[in-house]
Image (spheres, rainbow, N blue to C red):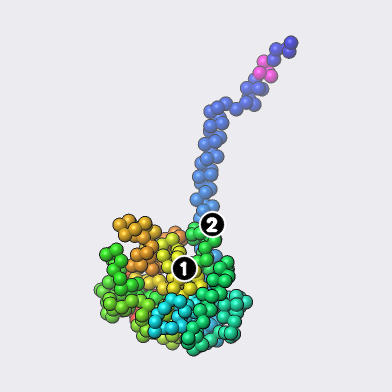
């Protein structure tokens, strides 16, 4: 039989033990600390993702300038060898393909277009079409673009998509009134919000049928010739490339980065930044990604805005609250007006 505890030992034992209330207080303090730390950690992660995205855009800016130095024109947003038929089967590649040699991806480019070294204007060499891009990626479906994704995008990481889209400027997204819902289309046809009448294509024209003189931005998927000289508003005042999200853009989610018709060559500034379009059908709010009047715009998962590459190679984050008219002025290459502060 053990001797009874002395009074001192009983006191020590009581002092060293935790009561239930004390444990609950400690747990509550830890929970509060975690709650305070998580937003700070998330902000750091968001900032890192934004910086990585901006770095990718900066590389594309260098590549676009290098392409121009070599060819005297900007890379085509997209190109189809048989322009008269506007058929999608003779796809010669998006601007992401044509800039590969200037993105340290010359090996991949030569596999796609082995006879095009150094790369020259595709509309000079591709008459008749070879389906080279489609043929290559049908045989090599695992090819990914190392600088194609923004870390903040939560779309399927295994998908062969890119978040970086060439700018149509304040161009009508489509002549089709999808879902009887097109609140922004009026802005590309000389509405009071627009800087000048006659912007964009007329209401009866499709964005894919424009010629270079009609193109308000600098890229489209039909391969119109654009030079730095045609950017009359100045390179520092003109958007070249911006972010978009496959979840909100059916041509991005359903296509691939290498296709002219894959979505990386056409996004319009008439849709406000971060206009959501990830609904399930025409009746949903927000609308769904196949409603081009909403989906073919620039958008990101960054808080409050999206990143854009300007013609001078600078990368800026534009807030989604930017004045709509100012945004269109930045999208247009030749309105010859000075945009307001942004």
Residue 176 placement, left or right of 246: left
Q: Residue at x 70, y 12 (%)?
A: 4
Q: Which mark is residue 328?
A: none
Q: Residue at x 65, y 20 (%)?
A: 11
Residue 244 placement, left or right of 172: right
Q: Nearer the viewer, mark 2 or mark 1?
A: 1
The reply to whether residue 278 is visible in this rendering is yes
**For the N terminus, which image quadrant?**
top right
Q: Which residue is mark 2?
A: 45
The reply to whether residue 341 is visible in this rendering is no
Dominant secondary structure of the magenta stretch? helix
The image quadrant of residue 70 is: bottom right
Q: Residue at x 35, y 67 (%)?
A: 292
| Comes first in the chain, label 2 or label 1 | 2
The image quadrant of residue 213 is: bottom left
Crowd tier of the residue under label 2, counting other residues whose Cα lies within 10 Å: few below 14, some 14–19, many 20 or above: some
Q: Residue at x 33, y 72 (%)?
A: 174
Residue projecting furthest to the top = 1
From the viewer's side, name the closer residue of 167 and 289.
289
Q: Where residue 22 sits in the image (x, y, percent)?
A: 56, 30
Up/down of 332 relative to 7, above or below: below
Q: Which residues are magenta?
A: 6-10
**For the C terminus, which image quadrant?**
bottom left
Q: Which residue is mark 1?
A: 255
């Amino acid at each position: 039989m053990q001797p009874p505890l002395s009074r001192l030992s009983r006191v020590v034992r009581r002092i060293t033990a935790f009561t239930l209330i004390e444990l609950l207080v400690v747990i509550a303090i830890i929970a509060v600390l975690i709650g305070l730390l998580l937003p700070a950690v998330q902000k750091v992660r968001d900032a890192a993702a934004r910086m990585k995205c901006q770095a990718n855009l900066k590389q594309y800016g260098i590549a676009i300038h290098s392409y121009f130095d070599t060819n005297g024109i900007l890379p085509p947003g997209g190109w189809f060898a048989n322009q008269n038929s506007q058929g999608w089967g003779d796809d010669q590649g998006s601007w992401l393909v044509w800039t590969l040699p200037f993105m340290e991806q010359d090996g991949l480019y030569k596999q796609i277009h082995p006879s095009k070294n150094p790369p020259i204007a595709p509309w000079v060499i591709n008459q008749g079409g070879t389906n080279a891009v489609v043929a290559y990626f049908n045989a090599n479906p695992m090819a990914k673009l190392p600088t194609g994704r923004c870390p903040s995008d939560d779309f399927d990481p295994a998908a062969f998509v890119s978040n970086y889209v060439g700018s149509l400027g304040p161009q009508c997204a489509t002549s089709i009134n999808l879902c009887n819902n097109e609140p922004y289309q009026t802005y590309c046809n000389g509405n009071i919000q627009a800087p000048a009448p006659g912007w964009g294509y007329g209401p009866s024209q499709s964005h894919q049928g424009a010629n270079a003189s009609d193109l308000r931005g600098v890229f489209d998927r039909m391969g119109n010739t654009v030079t730095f000289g045609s950017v009359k508003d100045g390179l520092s005042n003109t958007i070249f490339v911006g972010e978009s999200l496959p979840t909100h853009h059916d041509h991005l989610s359903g296509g691939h980065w290498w296709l002219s018709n894959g979505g990386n060559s056409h996004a319009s500034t008439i849709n406000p930044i971060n206009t959501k379009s990830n609904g399930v059908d025409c009746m949903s709010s927000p609308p769904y990604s196949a409603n081009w009047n909403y989906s073919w715009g620039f958008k990101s998962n960054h808080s409050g805005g999206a990143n854009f590459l300007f013609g001078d190679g600078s990368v800026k984050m534009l807030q989604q609250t930017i004045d709509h008219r100012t945004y269109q002025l930045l999208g247009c290459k030749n309105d010859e007006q000075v945009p307001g502060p942004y």
